[in-house]
Structures are given as C-alpha cells and as structure tokens.
Amino acid sequence: AGCYGLLQGLGLDPIRWDAAPTTGGRHFGTLGNPNFLSAVLAGAVVLSLAMGVRGQSRPRSMAWLSLPILLLVMALTGSRGGFLGLAAGLLAYVLLNPGIRAWPPAKKGLLAAGFIASCFVLLAGSTSLGSRLVGSLTHPWEAASQSRLHIWGPALAMASAHPWTGIGLDAFKIAFPRYQGEQFGLLDGDLVSSRTAHCEPLQVLATTGAVGLAGYLALIAWAAQALRKRL
C-alpha cells in the first residue's frame, strides 16, 4: 500500500481513480482513503523503529531503510490524524519499553533527534500536511468546526439514544441523517451522510454502546500489557 502511494506521488499510478480521494494532492495507495493509508503507515513506522532498535542484523538494516519511504508516503497522504497517531505510537513505545528508560542520555538524545527529523521529513514532504497541521495548531476550533464537530455531536446523540448496545455495527451511515444538524448539511451537502464518526472510540460507542466500548478499552489495555511484557 505504501509503495503504491509512492507511485501515486510520483505520478506513475497506472489506474485512473476518481479524483475525490486525491483532492489537494493527497494520496491513498491501495486503501481508497488517505487517512486509512496514513494510519497503516504510522503503525508500520513504529514497528520498523522497534525492529531497527532491537532486531537482528539483516532485518535491522531493512527496517532503517524502510523508514524514510514510510515517512515520505505518510507525508503524501496529508493526514493530520496519521501524524498524531505516529506521535502517540512513538510515545507508547518509549513508555512501554523499560530498556529505553535505562539508555544513557546520549542515546536518548539520538532517539529524540530522530523523532524531530521524522517530523521534518513529514512536514517538508507535503505542503498539504504542513499547512493543515499549522492551521489546526493555530486555529484548533475553526479546524474542528470544519465538519468534525458536526459529526461528533450526532455520534454522541446516537450513543445517548442507544447507550448500552449502540445503533448496530456498520449502521453509522444509515443512522446519521436522523441525528445530523443543519450545519453539517451546509458544510458537506444535504444529501451527504458521514460514514464514520472520525473518532474510533466515539465510533465504537455510537455503534456498539457502552458494552462495546468497554470491550474495546479492555482489548487495548490487554494489548499494551502484552506488549510491555515482550519489550
């Protein structure tokens, strides 16, 4: 998926896709959505970093060589969520890895420098990502108001109407028009329905209720604990 996204960035995509997913120069690889591709690559970056730090000789070399490509394609997606997911993944890797806390200051500084360099690669590789991130940081409320708040509100209304079991799996798009407000129609069109809540915990809460959210959070806690034991 990442290599295909790189081909798109180089203008070598052999398939003529609908222009909608690439509006503003954002590329989506084989996943059909820039945000989906960025989320997958964010996880791949963290895994490659972990392999580069602790893997054996040959896999370590491949991991370090793959990092610039993964970061470049992440930049081509122009996804703010992917960038924040990468930052969260790297923070989790550091916090859950006792070995890193025992590193000498020089090695920790090298890791921090690598993170800063990664941010630079992401921002320099895509003017779309850079401008969207700057806009989000300088005007957070205005950025969130560009449809996100008008999706989260109906999602909370769904959860309030069906608190225990939600509206049902994959039913968000079907139920959304019943709960959406006028402002969403003004921004995205009256005949448009949001497919998801654009916030995974909120999506789980709206579609599976408190029961599903509890299971979702328990799964994350279990995975974090298992990862910490392996690290």
Image: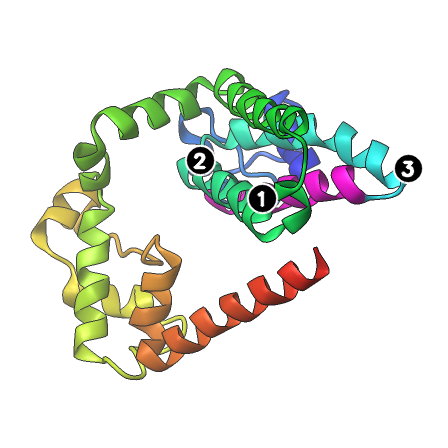
- Residue type, numbered disc 3: Ser
Instruction: Please name the residue that numbered disc 1 is placed on.
Output: 94
Q: Is residue 31 visible?
A: no
Task: For mark 2, give the secondary structure.
Answer: loop
- Residue type, numbered disc 2: Ser
Q: Can you tell which of label 3 and label 1 is closer to the viewer? A: 1
Work out whether mark 3 precedes mark 1 in sequence or the reverse, and give the earlier one.
3
Instruction: Please name the residue that numbered disc 2 is placed on.
Output: 79
Q: Can you tell which of label 2 and label 3 is closer to the viewer? A: 3
Residue 152 belongs to magenta span:
no
Instruction: Please name the residue that numbered disc 3 is placed on.
Output: 57
Task: For mark 1, give the secondary structure.
Answer: helix
Work out whether mark 2 precedes mark 3 in sequence or the reverse, and give the earlier one.
3
Task: For mark 3, give the secondary structure.
Answer: helix
Query: Which of 49 and 200 lies nearest the eye of the viewer?
Result: 49
Residue 46 belongs to magenta span:
yes
Q: Can you tell which of label 2 and label 1 is closer to the viewer? A: 1
User: What residue sits 31% from the left and 57% below the top?
Assistant: 197
Which quadrant of the figure contains the N terminus?
top right
Q: Is residue 74 left or right of residue 79?
A: right
Q: Quadrant of residue 222?
A: bottom right
Q: Is residue 12 left or right of residue 202?
A: right
| Span highlighted in magenta in the image | 35-54
Where does the image place residue 169, in percent across and percent down from the top left? 40, 75
Work out whether mark 2 precedes mark 1 in sequence or the reverse, and give the earlier one.
2
Where does the image place residue 147, in percent across and percent down from the top left? 22, 44
Where does the image place residue 164, in percent across and percent down from the top left? 28, 84
Q: Is residue 174 left or right of residue 120?
A: left
Q: Judge whether 61 appears above or below 161 on screen.
A: above
